[in-house]
Image (cartoon, grey):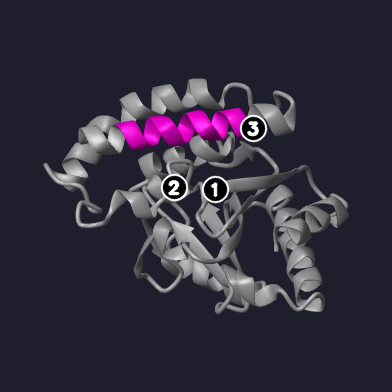
Amino acid sequence: MNKRHKIAIYGLITGAALFLFTNLFGCFATAEEKAEKLITKTETATEVKHGNHSCCDNEDAGEISSGSVYQLESEWTNQDGHMFFLKNLKGKKVVLTMFYASCTYACPILVQDMKRIETALEESNSISSYKFVLASIDPERDTPGVVKDFAKKNKFNLNRWTILTAGPDDVMELAAVTGFKYKKDKEGNYSHSNLITFLNEEGEIIHQQVGLNQDITNSLTYLNTQN
């Protein structure tokens, strides 16, 4: 991991941890602690993946906010099998959650909560400003083909929705900066946070909705103040 990348991630994690502590009253108080472990675990993997250069060396660092999720250099694959970087979402407001396709309880409810938000944004004629993103926490099973079938099953409009898969280190990195907790059990299933994260056009966390089947009124009210 080069020095600029490491500094950027530390800054992003610190900002995200402060947001989570301030807005969620300590629900994710260990996010920063987890992130410090993450940096140690992913340093070697990132050096191997990127060699002695950064994938974003040619980009003006000033174009991305220091508090932006788009500082992450993680490499993802979308439902069509194409390489995808989080910074590709820059310029759109993003509704994001982490999930896994074979989940039979919480994840389907999270998806429905996101769909309710999508419908409400359609009714307010602001949908064109938004992208909806599902990022898998199950890299072993959630191949591009699997998540593409998941998209078809859920009748996603893929002009709005993107489903992403990545390696374990990249998944942990995104989870750490958004305060999303997950743990794999012996059967290969996951216990995880029920968390929908809202990003502004610069990729900064502006709001989070915690829990399942939540009243989306508060989230929508907050989002409307950001338009």
The tag earlier along the polypeptide, 3 or 2, is 3
- Near-viewer residue (95 or 82): 95
Residue 124, percent across and down? 80, 75
Which callout, 3 or 1, points at the residue further toward the start of the chain? 3
Q: Amino acid at mark 1?
A: Glu
- Which residue ends up furthest to the left in the rendered image? 52
Marks 3/1: CA–CA distance: 12 Å
* Numbered badge on residue 28: none
Left or right position of 45 against 226:
left
Seen at 62% across and 79% down, the residue is 157
Residues at marks 2 and 1 touching, judged by CB atoms closer than 8 Å = yes
Q: Residue at x 51, y 53 (%)?
A: 203
Tag 2 residue: 65
The extreme front residue here reads 62
Instruction: Locate the C terminus and report the quarter of the image it occupies.
Output: bottom right
Magenta range is 7-19
Q: Is residue 114 left or right of residue 92?
A: right
x and y percentages locating residue 97 in the rendered image = 61, 52
Mark 3 or 2, closer to the camera: 2
Mark whose residue sits in front, 2 or 1: 2
* Residue at the disc numbered 1: 204
Position of residue 183 measured from the top left corner of the image (x, y, whole percent): 56, 33
Instruction: Answer left or right for 96 relative to 171.
Output: right
Q: Is residue 192 magenta?
A: no
The reply to whether the C-beta atoms of the residues labelled 3 and 1 are less than 8 Å apart is: no
Quadrant of the drawing holding the N terminus: top left
Residue depicted at x 57% and y 52%: 100
Q: Is residue 223 visible?
A: yes
